[in-house]
Image: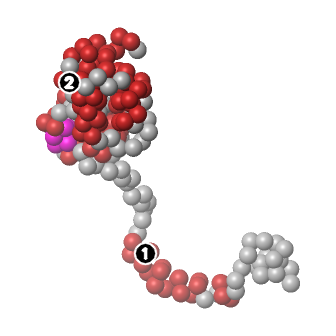
Amino acid sequence: MGDCRHVPDARAVLLIMATARSGVPRDFDAMERRRQRAAKMFGRGRSQADVARDLQVSRQSVSRWHADWSAGGIGALRGAGRAGRLPHLDQAALRRVERRLAKGPLTNGYATDMWTLQRVAEVIEAETGVVYHPGHVWRILREMGWSRRRPARRAVERDDAAIASWVKKEWPRVKKTPGAARPGSASKTSRAAVSSPR
């Protein structure tokens, strides 16, 4: 890792990698203030061990900061400004994709009226030229405010009027049967079980 300090953003990338694993939200401004304090301490002649102890950071971080500070001064310790890889799709591209998705799968040439991650990935590629794995498409959909929905499973033959009539007429009769009034049990050894001999 000795050569990483010569790459301008290597310091930020290493810092982001180290803190991203902890799951704790990072305060980028506080991290930059800590690096700036370290630079001032280096300028006053403080040792790396003293800086690490005073700022409560690892000696490896202070060593990296000192190398960056020696090579480029206090400006070399500025933060990258953001964590992670830059997004492939900007907000304008996301709006174009969302408008196309809002038209529905049938309008986009699919045989059924249901979006799948594969279909959304195809629309994104057709609209923007950016290829995403279907497994990653879900993150983009969440970013756009879309949520997962399953289609209501209803039988094609379903007759709501017949169901309502049955519930009104037959259900009260079925509910009042002698077996329904007693507590039952699936256990053959339980006395309360309808199936056990008395």
Q: Alpha-carbon distance for marks 1 and 2?
A: 79 Å
Give the residues in magenta.
Answer: 94-100
Q: Which residue appears at 20% of the width and 24% of the height?
A: 74
Q: Quadrant of the N terminus?
A: top left
Taking depth in this image into account, of 32 and 12 the one nearest to the observer is 32
* Total labels drawn: 2
Task: Find numbered disc 1 in the image and state the secondary structure of the residue it sits on.
Answer: helix
Most distant residue in the right direction: 198
The mark that comes first in sequence, 1 or 2, is: 2
**Is 92 left or right of 142, judged from the image as shown?**
left
- Read off the residue under disc 2: 74
125 relative to 114, above or below = above
Residue 55: % across, % down: 35, 36
- Read off the residue under disc 1: 162
Task: Find numbered disc 2 in the image and state the secondary structure of the residue it sits on.
Answer: helix
Query: For residue 180, what is the image quadrant?
Result: bottom right
Q: Which residue appears at 44% of the width and 39% of the height?
A: 22
Most distant residue in the front direction: 45
Q: Quadrant of the C terminus?
A: bottom right
**Is 194 left or right of 105, judged from the image as shown?**
right
> Does residue 89 belong to the magenta stretch?
no
Q: Which residue appears at 70% of the width and 86% of the height?
A: 182
Taking depth in this image into account, of 172 and 132 the one nearest to the observer is 132
Q: Could you classify mark 2 by the number of other residues whose Cα lies within 10 Å: few (under 14), some (14-19), or many (20 or more)?
A: many
| Res. 122 mark | none
Query: For residue 120, what is the image quadrant?
Result: top left
Q: Amino acid at mark 1?
A: Ala
Residue 33: % across, % down: 24, 36
The prevailing secondary structure element of the residues shown in magenta is: helix
Residue 189: % across, % down: 84, 74
